[in-house]
Amino acid sequence: MYDAVFIEGMNKPTAMLFYEFFANDAQSAMINKGMPGVRVVPEPIVSECTVMEEIEAGVDGVMDDVVAALTRPLTAEEKSPKPKKVEKPSRIIFKGNLQEVNRFFYQRGWADGLPVVPPTEEAVAEMLTGTDLPPDHLVAELEPRRGKATVEKIAINAVMAGALPTYMPVLIAGVKALKSGSPNTIMMAASTGSFAPVWIVNGPIRHDLHINSSSGTLSPGDIANATIGRAMGLITKNVRGVRKGMEDMGILGHPGKYTMVIGENEEANPWEPLHVERGFKKEDSTISLLFSQSFQQLGSYGTDDKGLLRTMVYNMTPGGMGAPWLILTPVNAQSLAKRGWTKKSINDYIVENARAPRDHFPRLPGMGEDKGDPKEPVPIIRLRPGQSNPIQILVFGGMNPLIGFLSGGYTVTEKIELPANWNKLVAKYKNVVPTYARY
């Protein structure tokens, strides 16, 4: 739809074909780009269809509509569209008890299916103590809605997610990452592929906020991991305007869209942590964003380098979406490093040895059966020009030799800036940690 709007902006008439179940997405995209009058033609064939008879029947069925859309005279409204009046919202949205507030927010599409903390004036004011920036400071204008992510709006969504004020610097940096990653972040957030944002935190702030990087890093139970990701999800919905079934057209969905926050275990990492690899100082605190379609964890074939590397190459998925991120627990990373392996040599080994028959890749450019012997083993990981380390390696998790894979791709990293009162703020919330009873 964005392409159609661009072409229309050059005074070239278009008729945008869209899959009939994507009507909401098409309408939203037109409005967000300021051109709600683009003519569209719904069609009944899914865009990934490979059955030629169905494709031809679908094309034949809509050709008259396409011709009509391109030739029908403009209506008065199309010639002079009237801008929609936008009323200034009230500071007070609703009054009621906790159950009533939650129901009100949910029915208006502002929640994520879980209960929210009501963003009262007092709660938002407390959240704002986590930053030196004024409430009306514009952190970023976020696509596709072009929503204004002010500090106050970030704070409101943070309160709703149950976050602590100490998380505000992380969330502000996360919003900047959403902006600097555009347009990739738009495509990933709205894709039918159900990509979930993965937030990776590095640097000293991991300890200040008690961000989990050990056992059960991706499991529930840690307020920082849980609410930082959840707050970014609510910002994506309420500020960016990416809503399930409207702009987010993920087919199967992804549980990671609730939250997927990782603290890298730098202390147990024998190599450089992610943020240092990406040009930051070790003492910097950063947040990195990538979008992942899938997560997989495997028992390793052995705890020495041979067993670990066999696990990697034999479980690399042909035709996976994006280059994989390899997750190593501390014991695996240390076992490999002790035997002389570096991130670069691990990459080289996987690229060389992870192979599958050519006919496992029929839909990937240059990998189809007609390009050579269909049974010839070809590399699963294909290097782009100038690329040497296609596989990113993260170290986190418990002390067990499991191996994990995240599908990944384009990554952006932002430095986290701390307010002047940081040490005092950390001290105020340092005891917000779970204490479990001993059975």
Image (cartoon, rainbow, N blue to C red):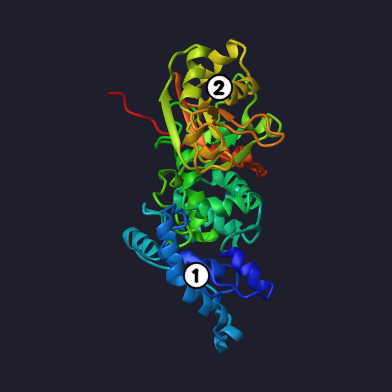
Image quadrant holding the N terminus, namely bottom right
Secondary structure at badge 2 equals helix
Decide: few, some or many residues near mark 2? Use Cα within 10 Å; few <14, some 14-19, many ≥20: some
The residue singled out by tag 1 in the image is 27
Q: Earlier in the sequence, mark 2 or mark 1?
A: 1
Inspect the image, locate mark 1, and give the three-letter code of the amino acid beneath it: Gln
> Between 340 and 20, which is closer to the camera in this rendering?
20
Q: Quadrant of residue 88?
A: bottom right
Secondary structure at badge 1 equals helix
Residue for point 50% across, 55% down: 190
Which x, y percent locates residue 251? Answer: 41, 52
Instruction: Please say whether residue 216 is visible from this viewpoint.
Output: no
Which x, y percent locates residue 389? Answer: 65, 29
Question: Is 246 situated above or below 73?
Answer: above
Outermost residue toward the bottom in this view: 76
Which x, y percent locates residue 204? Answer: 61, 31
Image quadrant holding the C terminus, namely top left
The reply to whether the C-beta atoms of the residues labelled 2 and 1 are less than 8 Å apart is no
Inspect the image, locate mark 2, and give the three-letter code of the amino acid beneath it: Asn
Residue for point 54% across, 84% down: 72
Residue for point 72% across, 34% down: 386
Instruction: Please say whether residue 361 is visible from this viewpoint.
Output: yes
The residue singled out by tag 2 in the image is 353
